[in-house]
């Protein structure tokens, strides 16, 4: 059996393609149902974030497996197989294992050393494990990469002063509107990106924060956890857009939440932050004179400014990763069922 990863990410695909290949629970279920019964897929885990989707699988034949996977992605997304082969990277064997450890350690993140990726990896693996899609090998690997990701952050400086994507989004808002701390801001969602944004706003002393989400109990919990947070009913969002100078959205939705017509009549200057993949805000909103739209691509340039301060610690992170990989190899040897992938090195471009 061979370990393989098929990866589509922010450096290989633009946001239009990223949002099509993003995978929520229903999408993951589609892939798992469609592939796990096939000959070339023994185990599978899917990781999906705001800037990447990764299909991790154990297979007897990586080439045939990825061809079948690409055809399945095409069925789901209507992206041609030729385009998927162009934007996808196939990591096999040791390369796949190193890729996963670097991913969990924040080395492949848009923001070097960021922490959000760990919770996203945990979610993807937990969902697939509960589905019954994983076995001994992937469970061992994901247990190890998560533990290594934590160790890297506690024993090196790779995350020292590191901003998450959500934190950088708040910094970008501040750059666009230096007075935003004195003006109402609406955050829509209740996941990790909203939670980290709330923590950042609290540390900055923002006192006019509103939160909304389809599940009200989740934002009510956030309102209790942070000071100066007011819960707003989800159904009233569009009627109250005129009250805010900043709207920050980080939810999973297959349809646009805010369209050009929703804000074109507003009199105030407004900053819109869209951290959703698929996107939550109509890109046409950014063409309005009174609106500024910040989305994932715009944040990459902001995040690059944080890189140099922590890049010197990358060699130390790689040492930790190599120790963890050696531990997995020893585990495989102990089981006396060595994975063939240790002798295979290849990458599909």
Image (cartoon, grey):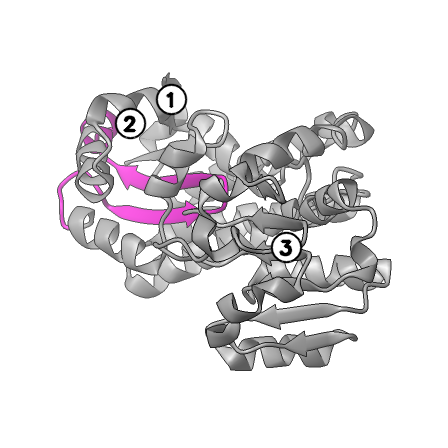
- Give the residue at x 62% y 61%: 194
Of residues 167 and 31, the one nearer the viewer is 167
The answer to which image quadrant residue 196 occupies is bottom right
Q: Which mark is residue 267?
A: 3
- Give the residue at x 67% y 46%: 169
Q: Secondary structure at mark 2?
A: helix
- Give the residue at x 74% y 29%: 307
Q: Measured along the vertical axis of the image, is residue 180 above or below residue 81?
A: below
Q: Which residue is mark 1?
A: 343
The answer to which image quadrant residue 111 occupies is top right
Q: Earlier in the sequence, mark 1 or mark 3?
A: 3
Q: Which residue is mark 2?
A: 84
Q: Is residue 186 left or right of residue 214?
A: right
Span shown in magenta: 37-66
The crowd level at tag 2 (other Cα within 10 Å; few <14, some 14-19, many 20+) is some
Q: Can residue 247 be seen by looking at this rendering?
A: yes
């Amino acid at each position: 059996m061979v370990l393989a990863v098929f990866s589509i990410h922010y450096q290989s695909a633009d946001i239009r393609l990223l949002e099509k290949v993003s995978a929520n629970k229903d999408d993951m279920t589609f892939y798992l149902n469609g592939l796990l019964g096939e000959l070339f897929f023994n185990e599978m885990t899917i990781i999906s974030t705001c800037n990447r989707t990764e299909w991790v699988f154990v297979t007897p034949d990586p080439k045939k497996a990825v061809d079948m996977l690409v055809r399945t992605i095409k069925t789901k997304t209507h992206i041609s197989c030729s385009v998927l082969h162009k934007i996808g990277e196939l990591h096999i064997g040791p390369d796949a294992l190193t890729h996963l450890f670097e991913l969990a350690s924040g080395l492949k993140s848009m923001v070097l050393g960021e922490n959000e990726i760990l919770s996203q990896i945990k979610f993807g693996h937990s969902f697939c494990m509960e589905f019954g899609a994983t076995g001994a090998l992937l469970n061992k690997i994901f247990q190890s990469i998560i533990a290594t990701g934590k160790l890297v952050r506690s024993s090196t400086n790779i995350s020292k002063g590191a901003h998450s994507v959500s934190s950088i989004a708040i910094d970008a808002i501040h750059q666009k509107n230096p007075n935003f701390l004195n003006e109402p801001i609406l955050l829509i969602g209740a996941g990790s990106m909203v939670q980290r944004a709330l923590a950042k706003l609290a540390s900055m002393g923002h006192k006019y924060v509103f939160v909304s989400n389809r599940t009200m109990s989740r934002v009510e919990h956030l309102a209790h956890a942070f000071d100066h947070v007011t819960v707003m009913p989800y159904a009233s969002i569009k009627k109250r857009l005129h009250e805010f100078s900043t709207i920050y959205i980080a939810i999973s939705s297959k349809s646009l939440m805010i369209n050009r017509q929703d804000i074109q009549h507003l009199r105030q200057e407004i900053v819109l932050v869209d951290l959703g993949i698929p996107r939550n805000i109509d890109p046409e909103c950014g063409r309005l004179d009174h609106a500024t739209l910040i989305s994932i691509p715009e944040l990459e340039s902001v995040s690059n400014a944080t890189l140099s301060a922590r890049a010197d610690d990358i060699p130390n992170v790689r040492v930790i990763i190599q120790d963890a990989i050696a531990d997995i190899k020893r585990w495989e040897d102990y089981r006396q069922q060595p994975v063939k992938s240790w002798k295979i090195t290849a990458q599909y471009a």
